[in-house]
Image (cartoon, rainbow, N blue to C red):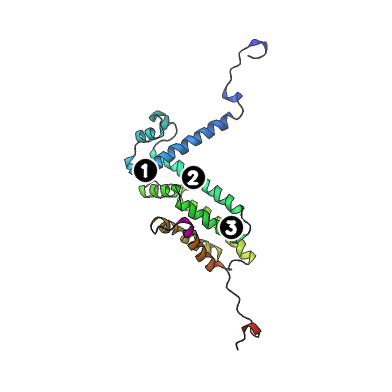
């Protein structure tokens, strides 16, 4: 009761942080629903999964499920978009932990291979094969652009520091990205371990990106032959 004995009705507006709490709960539910949808599509294909199946997998009613997503494909799009954004945040934070462009590039390669080896990438690949198209900011093309921008920054800082060969940073980023794309083949078809895949790609990248030894100067006794 309030002053004077009147009854005070507590509403959401009276509870600090209520909106944030509700939003966080909804986001957790969306991720949970999306993960279940991704797992089902991986097993049965997009056309083989109904909203009723998804509701049973999540443990909610169909009516409740429709409060969160319009259809199975929508559930998966939301999930993949959230996981992609989380990956961008995580890899940027990981690179920021490293000192110097060489260490940052090594970490970038390691994080990318770890993602390819993980369940989220396998689910995303299966969804793509199932025909679940992502557009706009969630599209694979936009994902590649953001990753390329991050890689471009690492390469550019390495060139300026003299530890990477001076060449087109964009071209180098494209070549490294294509090499990382092969990680899926190495891990899932050639059955290389994650560590061996990281090592193989890292050696190829650094053999190509480090500056060549400078040509010997004419008259330098170190270049003279006996």
Residue 179 image point, x, y percent: 47, 61
Q: Which sits earlier in the primary sequence, circle 3 or circle 2?
A: 2
Q: Can residue 179 be seen in this view?
A: yes
The residue nearer to you, when weighing 204 against 128, is 204
Residue 120 image point, x, y percent: 45, 47
The residue nearer to you, when weighing 3 against 112, is 112
Disc 2 to disc 1, how far (Cα)?
17 Å
Q: Name the residue that disc number 3 marks.
A: 104
Q: Which sits earlier in the primary sequence, circle 2 or circle 1?
A: 1
Q: Residue drawn at (45%, 33%), measured in percent from left and top?
A: 68
Q: Residue drawn at (48%, 44%), measured in percent from left and top?
A: 81
Dot 2 alpha-carbon crowd within 10 angstroms: few under 14, some 14 to 19, many 20 or more: some
Number of numbered discs? 3
In the rendered image, the quadrant that contains the C terminus is: bottom right
Q: Can residue 171 be seen in this view?
A: no
Magenta-highlighted residues: 192-196
Q: Where on the picture, by quarter, is residue 218? A: bottom right
- Identify the mark at residue 52; answer none if there is no mark: none
Identify the residue at the far left of this view: 48
The residue nearer to you, when weighing 196 against 54, is 196
**Of helix, strand and loop, which one carries label 2?**
helix
Q: Name the residue that disc number 1 marks.
A: 41
Label 3 near label 1: C-beta < 8 Å? no
């Amino acid at each position: 009761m309030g002053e004077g004995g009147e009854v005070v009705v507590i509403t959401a507006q009276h509870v600090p942080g209520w909106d944030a709490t509700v939003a966080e709960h909804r986001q957790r539910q969306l991720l949970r629903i999306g993960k279940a949808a991704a797992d089902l599509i991986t097993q049965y294909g997009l056309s083989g999964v109904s909203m009723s199946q998804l509701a049973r997998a999540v443990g909610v009613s169909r009516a409740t499920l429709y409060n969160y997503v319009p259809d199975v494909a929508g559930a998966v799009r939301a999930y993949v978009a959230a996981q992609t954004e989380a990956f961008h945040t995580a890899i940027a934070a990981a690179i920021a932990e490293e000192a110097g462009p060489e260490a940052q590039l090594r970490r970038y390669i390691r994080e990318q291979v770890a993602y390819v080896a993980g369940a989220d990438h396998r689910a995303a690949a299966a969804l793509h094969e199932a025909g679940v198209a992502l557009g706009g900011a969630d599209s694979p093309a936009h994902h590649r652009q953001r990753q390329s921008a991050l890689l471009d920054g690492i390469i550019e800082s390495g060139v300026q520091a003299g530890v990477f060969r001076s060449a087109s940073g964009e071209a180098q980023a494209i070549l490294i990205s294509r090499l990382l794309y092969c990680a899926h083949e190495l891990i899932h078809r050639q059955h290389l371990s994650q560590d061996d895949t990281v090592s193989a790609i890292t050696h190829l990248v650094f053999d190509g990106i480090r500056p060549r030894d400078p040509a010997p100067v004419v008259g330098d006794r170190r270049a003279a032959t006996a």
